[in-house]
Amino acid sequence: MSPDLEDIDLENICKEILDKDIDAIICSNTTILHEYPHVGGLSGEELFKISNKSLKSFRSFLGPSVPIIASGGVMSRYHFERKLELGADLVQVYTGMIYKGPILVKEILNS
């Protein structure tokens, strides 16, 4: 079974990250690759599974040497913890903060 084009693209990006000795990456943000009609860049909870797939691929290709800041659909403590389980070193909670406000940070830290 051959790798799909997306995996080849990610592998090439990771080779460049390693070749250029980049300190860290943010993975991932919005995407236009979705099935919702009349929507631009997809963000929020609908992005969670898509961004997790990218996070797993980046961690696999990069190994533990490059810190990854994960984003994409982090709306709860579960989402936060899942990003860490998949290899994130840090987690961005941008859209979650817009929808839930600072209470999200309290939920993540105190649950």
Image: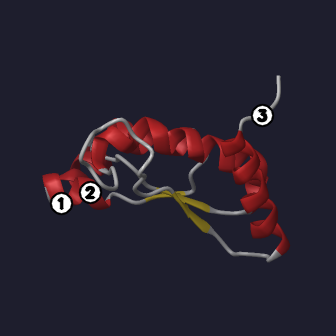
13 left or right, relative to 49: right
Label annotation for residue 3: 3
Q: At 26% across and 49% down in the image, what residue appears?
A: 39
In the image, 55 versus 83, the foreground residue is: 55
102 left or right, relative to 41: left
Q: Which amino acid, by three-letter code, is at mark 2?
A: Thr
Quadrant of the frame with the C terminus: top left
How far apart marks 1 and 3 lie (CA) works out to: 37 Å
User: Circle 2 — which element?
Assistant: helix
How far apart marks 3 and 2 lie (CA) works out to: 32 Å
Estimate the x, y position of residue 78 in percent, counting from the top left: 36, 35
Quarter holding residue 65? bottom right
Count of numbered labels shown in the rendering = 3
The residue wearing badge 2 is: 95
> What is the crowding at mark 3: few (fewer than 14 residues within 10 Å), some, or many (at least 20)?
few
Quarter holding residue 80? top left
Estimate the x, y position of residue 58 in percent, counting from the top left: 67, 50
Vertical order, 45 against 94 (above or below): above
Q: Which numbered disc flags the more N-terminal residue, 3 or 2?
A: 3
Label annotation for residue 63: none
The residue wearing badge 1 is: 98
Quadrant of the frame with the N terminus: top right
> What is the crowding at mark 1: few (fewer than 14 residues within 10 Å), some, or many (at least 20)?
few
Please tell me whether mark 1 or mark 3 is closer to you in this view: 3
Q: At 32% across and 39% down in the image, what residue appears?
A: 46
